Image (spheres, rainbow, N blue to C red):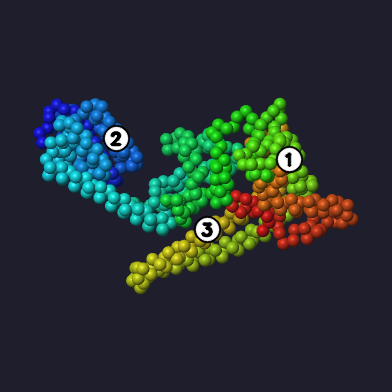
Amino acid sequence: MEITKDKKCILYCRVSSKEQEDRGYSLEAQEKLLTGYAERNDLEMAKIFKISESASGKQIRKTFNEMLNYVRKGKIDIILCEKIDRLTRNLKDGAVISDWVSSDENKQVHFVKENFVVSKNTRAHENLVWDMKVAIARFYTNNLSEEVKKGQKAKIESGWIPCGQKFGYKTVGEKGHKIHVLDEKIAPFVKRAFELYNSGNYTIKRLVETLYKEGLRSKSNKKVGHSTIHKLLADPFYTGVILWNNEEHEGKHEPIVPEDLFNEVQDKLKRKYKVGQIKKHFHTFKGLIKCGECGCLITWETQKSHHYGRCKGFKPCKQKGYIREEKIEETLNKAFEKIKPASIKVLDWIKRALKESHAGQKTYSGTAKTSLNQALDVINKRLDKIYDDKIDEVITLEYYKKRFKEFSDEKKRILKELNRTENRTLNYYEVGVEIHELAFNAQKLYNSGKTTTDDKRILLNKIFADMSLKDHRLNYEYTPSYKFLAEWIPKLNATSELLKNSEYYEKTGSFEPAHPCLLGDKDSNLGYQGQNLVSYR
């Protein structure tokens, strides 16, 4: 078809995959081709529309619609494109382009590389070619989609997520076989985000500000966006689970947060804290106490400098009226008293007992590590041997792959157990001391005028697993660690008083284990189980 001179045109460039860009179909190459074509035919370029290989389906649709609106409003008659499959890959877009060129005899679409022009005057056999090429482009897209889904399914079955980078991780490996490994700089901030949000003291907005102050930065060296933080808090990927098409799959990547911490955060996310919720009166018990009747959260308000709580949930509830904050705190003070060692001397005795017990734990851990390292040496030798057998063709490739997977999985298990053993050794004494010191100081800390509302809430979350209000009385449950202390400390305190009055007091020393039955076969350290502190081993 003959080209009308001195007409305005637009250029439409699109690369739909990285492979195409590598083969010379880059946006720059397309732009150069189309620009040269426009110059040779005395066409004035009004605008260039580009779609990169990283663009999403929504972005492609948006750019396509923007291009059509632009040519309609600007009364531009000519669209230049490299090939048909650069412009459209579905029948709907093909019909839209056909309607556009049919609206005016001057409307034209030039596919430069194919030396093909579509217009209102295109002959019947040329229109057939146009329809066939659109159908072929559509087939290519559908076939590509099927192949991509097959690849994604295979990767998920092998334990890896078939997508780009996840915040807190980086991708390593060859093209098509990339896996996610921890980003040592970012992963600690991800775990920190879960821990802070779980404290109940942070909205997403406040969490973003806090993490930025602590050093977390985006790739552009700015604050990480609210949506990014919210998405990662709701993503089970950080517990080692791959969620794909609403189905959960076990991942091989290293988790950042334990499952119980993740689940606790999900409960708090469902409460739908509003951004900027922390205002003039941020009550100590906000979001921490449930109604014992209907299960809704107790809401708090301030009247004449006093704080009052009541249930006003949407569920039918018989519990009416308000309760003053002071009455709640009276019960809490009794709870703090129940887990408190009687004196600093009792606390010192506990620390000495922990230290002695820690020595035994170190001996046990040392033996365990020696055994694990020996098992690791055996596995490494087996891996070397089957590799040599494969090279020498003593075994088949299929047998090698099978045994390699078995030995590799066993090696991962041993390495993970070695890491756990090391952590238990490091945390054993420190965690035990921390728990008992907090129990000793909890009441004083809570009632101190210098303790902030945030610190009070953190303290309450560490000691109490659940608090509810029924018949204007506070009911509570300790976390596993402090539940054990609530049972053991009163006995220890009673024994210490007996020792002071005993004739054996000078002989045994202040708090020697004159009554070893108190500890039985348990030592006085509370270890970690996930995020919850649990009773003695």
Residue 363 pos. (x, y %): 64, 61
Instruction: Please indicate, yes or no, whether residue 76 appears anywhere in the rendered image.
Output: yes
Q: How many angstroms separate mark 2 from mark 1 (CA)?
A: 62 Å
Q: In the rendered structure, which disc, 3 or 2, sits on the residue that comes first in sequence?
A: 2
Q: In the rendered structure, which disc, 3 or 1, sits on the residue that comes first in sequence?
A: 3
Q: Residue furthest bottom?
A: 394
514 vs 322: above or below: below
Helix, strand or loop status at disc 1: loop
Tag 3–tag 1 contact (CB < 8 Å): no
Residue at x 61%, y 54% (from the top left corner): 529
**Residue at mark 2:** 65
Q: Amino acid at mark 3?
A: Lys
Residue at x 33%, y 38% (from the top left corner): 59
**Residue at mark 3:** 416
Front residue of this view, candidates 79 and 419: 79
Helix, strand or loop status at disc 2: helix
Front residue of this view, candidates 483 and 111: 111
Residue at x 48%, y 60% (from the top left corner): 412
Q: In the rendered structure, which disc, 2 or 1, sits on the residue that comes first in sequence?
A: 2
Front residue of this view, candidates 160 and 377: 160
**In this rendering, position of residue 370 left or right of residue 167:** right
Residue 397 pos. (x, y %): 35, 68
* Within-10-Å neighbours for mark 1: few <14, some 14–19, many 20+: some
Residue at x 38%, y 70% (from the top left corner): 399
The numbered disc on residue 302 is none
Helix, strand or loop status at disc 3: helix
Q: Amino acid at mark 1?
A: His
